[in-house]
Amino acid sequence: MIRPRALCFSLSNLCICTGLVTALGCSPFYVPPPDDCSNEKQNEFVYDAMQTAYLWNNELPPRSEVDFNASEPADFVKTLRQPDHDRWSRVADQSTSDALFQEGKFIGLGFSHRRDTDGKIRVSFVHEGSSAEAAGLRRGDEVTAINSVRIATIDEDGLWGEIFGPNDLGTTAAISVRKPAGDDQELILERTWVDIALVPATNVVTHNGKKIGYLHFATFVGAGADALDEAWDEFGEAKIDALVVDLRYNGGGLLSIARHLIDLIAGETAGGEVAYDVEYNPNLADENETRKIKDPKRSLPLEHVTFITTRSTLSASELVINSVRAHMPVYVVGKQTGGKPVGSKHYDFCDKTLFPITFRLRNADGASDYFDGLAPNCELDDDFDHELGDPAEEGFAAALNAPAGICPEPAEDALPPPQAPRTTRLPDGEDIQPRDPLARIAGSN
């Protein structure tokens, strides 16, 4: 998801904004907090916030037809979603959301997985310092069973939403894996606080006489701007000519960090030009704004940029691609992206946070509404047999050749491309672990 900083927040019946306190509210986005934290009052607050700021607020059911006691807020908000485009408006725990967005950490086992073209579950990413890493789990390992339940049974019985057990600190899960060499292992993983490595890998390679930088950017949260600056210092020292940005598992995050990445990529080329427009619902049209590209000192004169994507590439990641391609040559390799050209402001209430879809994003050429995703120039499957950042990895290799119009031949036994947007149901073949923080950022449920 894309989450810009809230304009104001509620305290009792007051609104605090830019240092001023007023009982009248200081922003057209302001919604009075619930009178108490009963289920009914919380749901009324959710409805009021959606009625005020939701992008499709004209499609909400009339208040008189809403049962505010029917469900908990997390389920209630789903009943208000616009059915054709909104898969993301949600209510989440405030403390864990703040930890993710502000500190870049989450509670989890520390790995993500995806289904390969043979239908096997493969480890796609392992977080540094996590229980998964300590147990020896690595990218490319095949997961054969979870908590003693075979993958075929999990698929048949639809157990993916529950098979890992409760996502509480200290709880464990048994993961059966088959290593690339063929040996089987049983690993017991414990849920801990995991610090996300925002830039897990960088590299600089020479290809056809040009220096190409490689950046794997995990998510737009926490200290993402600082991590990007460090990478650009490395690229500047190497005097790269072009760039590959690996966003294949990046489900989005903070709008401010997306802007910083846009500035770093395109600032030298298009400083002062329009990056993107933010458009709210008609009642909030006066709040629409245009963001310009800044030229930070670290920005480099890049000839082109190539992005590596999958269906898990969403939101802020797609904003970066869509914004940059209006100003310089852009290539995309991998899979069609997930399709989220919208974003959220957030509303804190009781011990929860509401993330309603509140705005649409449009690039300098007017391109928006890519709910079906952004199409790649070269389509290819994920390569689990190499580490990310290795030029032999098929995504990186394809990114190096895409500007010359060279795409790899599709594998004869490859599965057909997905025909519909994804949820986090792993049997669909393209999705990360349901409790992976990147899935939560994307707003999937």
Image: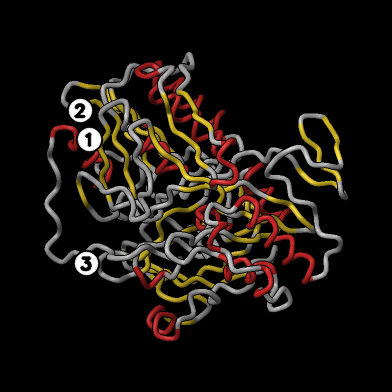
Foreground mark, 3 or 2?
A: 3
Q: Quadrant of residue 101?
A: top right
The first of marks 3 and 1 along the sequence is 1
Foreground mark, 2 or 1?
A: 1
Q: Which mark, residue 415?
A: 3
Determine contact: label 2, label 1, CB under 8 Å. Answer: yes
**SS at circle 3:** loop
Residue 410 locus on image (x, y percent)? 14, 56
**SS at circle 1:** helix
In the picture of the structure, the residue carrying the numbered disc 1 is: 400
Residue sitting at x 32%, y 65%: 420
**SS at circle 2:** strand
Residue placed farthest to the top in the image?
297
- Mark 3 nearby-residue class (10 Å; few <14, some 14–19, many ≥20): some
The first of marks 2 and 1 along the sequence is 2
Amino acid type, residue under disc 2 in the picture: His
The answer to whether residue 57 of the structure is visible from this angle is yes
Residue 347 locus on image (x, y percent)? 70, 51
Which sits in the foreground, 365 or 137?
365
In the picture of the structure, the residue carrying the numbered disc 2 is: 207
Q: Is residue 227 above or below residue 333?
A: above
- Mark 2 nearby-residue class (10 Å; few <14, some 14–19, many ≥20): few
On screen, residue 414 versus residue 436, left or right, reads: left
Q: Is residue 163 above or below residue 140?
A: below
Amino acid type, residue under disc 1 in the picture: Leu
Q: Which mark, residue 5?
A: none
On screen, residue 329 versus residue 222, left or right, reads: left
Which sits in the foreground, 269 or 12?
12
Q: CA distance from mark 3 to mark 2?
A: 30 Å
Q: Is residue 220 above or below residue 382?
A: above
Amino acid type, residue under disc 3 in the picture: Leu
